[in-house]
Amino acid sequence: MGVTKSEIFSDYQNKLALAARVLGHPARIAILQHLFKTDSCVCGDLVGVIGLAQPTISQHLKELKNLGIIKGNIDGTRVCYCIDTQKWEELKELFAGFLDQTASDKSCC
Amino acid sequence: MGVTKSEIFSDYQNKLALAARVLGHPARIAILQHLFKTDSCVCGDLVGVIGLAQPTISQHLKELKNLGIIKGNIDGTRVCYCIDTQKWEELKELFAGFLDQTASDKSCC
DNA sequence: AACATCTATCGTAATATTACAATTAATTAA
DNA sequence: TTAATTAATTGTAATATTACGATAGATGTT
């Protein structure tokens, strides 16, 4: 065990959970915040800004890239990352659709 | 290692990541959807609705309760769960504040 | 070419998560 | 009281995640 039984859930449930899981680490939140803050794309200086080793940052960037919300551009020996605004909007809609649910007052608690 | 270095991140970053992590499992998404859908609070029939064993559901409910977004009410031998609407609004605001960020067009990618 | 710089990947250790069987605890029903 | 019902807890196995040292690969510099 220890493995999520994705097959018993809907595509929507899996998709939303996957996206939430990617946001579920402070380093990835910090990376995204930094990418939003700096107008120019950020490269390896994320390692300096956030206090984690280079391979760790690289690993987090990979997960963000896999989700699709950031893009990487090779620029010499450097790699320049930025938000994929299209995908970010999709992410926003995905979460909004879920979070906008409202509970009925018929609740027993 | 394998342990998140929470101490190097801000309270906001940790708080948001923690909340996202709780949403980061399809069973918990399914539980929340079911609680929203059924007007009356749901009890152990979550075990029937979702295809997981009772202790597993109980464990997921515990995490949702820890985050504060659901409440449990003891009703005989049963426990009745529902959304904590106040906390749900706070969660919505937390995510909205983060997701509403927009990237500048000065991006290099 | 030789060296420096930057990032990705590999390997691995420590820890966390997921799932469930078995059990316990609490309440209701007989 | 005894039995039945329901949910939480405990224990544990399988897997995933996090972090980083070491290394490789790619590009730029001298």
Image: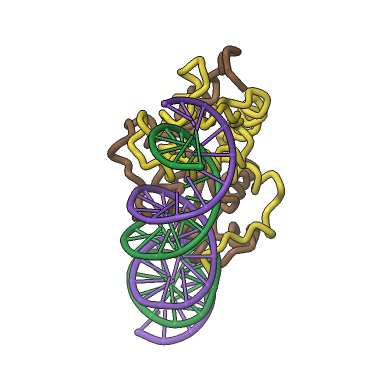
Chain colours: A yellow, B brown, C green, D purple
Where's residue B81, x and y in %?
50, 49
Tell me where residue A46 sits by quadrant. Answer: top left
Is B72 located above or below residue A28 in the figure?
below
Residue B19 drawn at (x, y percent): 45, 39
Q: Residue at x 37, y 36 (%)?
A: B14
Q: Nearer the viewer, residue A20 or B74?
A: A20
Describe residue A22's horizontal placement relative to residue A56 as left or right.
right
- Nearer to the camera, B73 or A37: A37
Furthest-left residue in view?
A: B7
As drawn, A105 above or below B25: above
Horizontal side of residue B90 vs B105, given as left or right: left
- Quadrant location of the C terminus of chain B in the rendered image: top right
Q: Is residue A107 visible?
A: no
Q: Picture coordinates of residue C6 (x, y %)?
A: 46, 33
On-image quarter of the N terminus of chain B: bottom left
Residue B75 shown left or right of residue B46 in the figure:
left
Total marks in image = 0
Query: Which residue appears at 60% of the width and 50% of the height?
Result: B26
| Residue A98 location (% of width, % of height) | 62, 35
Please give the name of the residue rendered at 61% of the width and 49% of the height, measured from the top-left corner.
Answer: B30
Eyeballing the image, is D12 above or below B6? Answer: below
Residue plotted at (59% across, 31% down): A72
Question: Is residue A41 visible in this depiction of the protein?
Answer: yes
Nearer to me, B75 or D28: D28
